[in-house]
Amino acid sequence: MFGIAVGAVFFGKPEIILLVGLGSAIPDLDREYGFLSKEYFTRLQIHRALCHNFLFLGLVYLVNPFLGLGAFLHTLLDALTTARDRGVEWLYPFTRLVNRAAYDYNGDRIELDPKHKIYLLQNELPVLTKETTKDLKPGRQTLPWRRTYGPALSGGLLDQGIFLGSLAIALLLLLSSALGLQKFIDITIRPIDPSFDFPFWIGVLGVGLSFVEGELGRKQLMKKFKPDRIYKALFYLSIGIMIFAVILGAIMNPQLVLATAGKIPYIAAGIALVILVSVVMLKIRSSKPLPMNAAEEPTII
């Protein structure tokens, strides 16, 4: 609803409003769905990392800038949540280049490994994960603190306020436009545009199915749902439908594909530059000798 409200306030065109709203549902595809085992998911804490980062947002932007805007709004709101709800890992996967911390849960110095010369400051503090859901707790190996956290508890008053407030704003703009007081949203009936409408609604179907199977997966974890085959089948079907929607949209809109293709070399060069700079910086830092004096700090990021 926040994405829809932003789309209504700043753009006013129904197709853009829907695209921003649809894009705001995309980042949560990194939940513990069919392509990640529960153990792998728990150990590496993929949720709010794999699809909640700048690199992923850039890839979504290449598909459609309004989808990218919606995905960014979702990630931004998640970044405002506390460690209980995991915040977001904006710089994934680059944050995973450093996999050691210099201090443990309690702030005590960890014995340094000569093979690792670059460390994050600290492992997760006990208070950060004590009250979180079971599927997001660290595994046997403690993990460095890589995420951006905010002051808000998800699922509480703030979530409800954002939802109801965004809904109220969108409805108010729609009512004002319908009554002719002020044209915020273009509500004129337009002819069907197959090149946009068909791929779009197929994509909506795919995202909708992904949320259905996500709820089945949640019930399965709670032991309230047994048939694993239905859950798996819906997962692969939803992913297939979304991929098909993107391919169909590309086939039906070749001019947009050509316009996007012209940007790909620049995007690829930018990604390569980021990776190159990251690797060079890590090499420079890791080439420094490890401190022999316990009072000295290792290289900490």
Image (cartoon, rainbow, N blue to C red):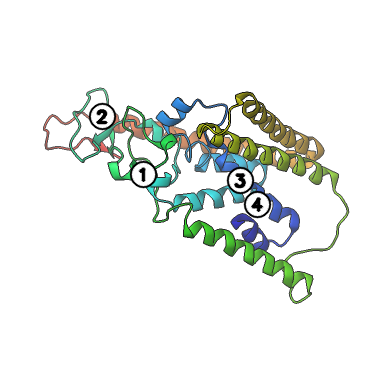
Looking at marks 1 and 4 on the same chain, the residue that comes earlier in the sequence is marked by: 4
The vertical placement of 210 against 113, above or below, is below
Residue 25 numbered mark, or none: 3
**Secondary structure under badge 2?**
loop
x, y percentage for residue 123?
29, 37
- Residue in view at x 21 percent, y 40 percent: 106
Element type at mark 3: loop
Q: Earlier in the sequence, mark 4 or mark 2?
A: 4
Dot 4: element: helix
Q: Nearer the viewer, mark 2 or mark 1?
A: 1
Q: Assess whether mark 2 and mark 4 are in contact (beta carbons under 8 angstroms).
A: no
Q: How many neighbours does mark 1 have within 10 angstroms: few (below 14), some (14-19), or many (20 or more)?
A: few
Instruction: Determine whether, in the image, residue 205 is placed left or right of residue 106.
Output: right
Q: Earlier in the sequence, mark 1 or mark 3?
A: 3
Q: Residues within 10 Å of mark 4 (few under 14, many from 20)?
A: many
Q: Residue 117, labelled with which disc?
A: 2
**On the image, numbered disc 1 is attached to which residue?**
131
Residue kind at label 1, given as amino acid type: Glu
Amino acid type, mark 2: Lys
Instruction: Give the number of the mark in front: 4 or 2.
Output: 4
Query: Toward the viewer: 261 or 295?
Result: 295
Would you say 32 lies left or right of 8 here?
Answer: left
Residue, x 44% and y 26% (percent of image)?
39
**Which is nearer the eye, 193 or 267?**
193
Q: Can residue 294 be seen in this snapshot? A: yes
Which x, y percent locates residue 256? 75, 42
The residue pinned by badge 4 equals 20
Question: Based on the displayed image, in which of its 4 quarters is residue 187 positioned?
Answer: bottom right
Q: Residue 166, position in %: x, y?
A: 60, 62
Whichever of labels 4 and 3 marks the residue nearer the N terminus, that label is 4
Distance between mark 1 and mark 4 Cα atoms: 33 Å
Report x, y in % for residue 237: 69, 29
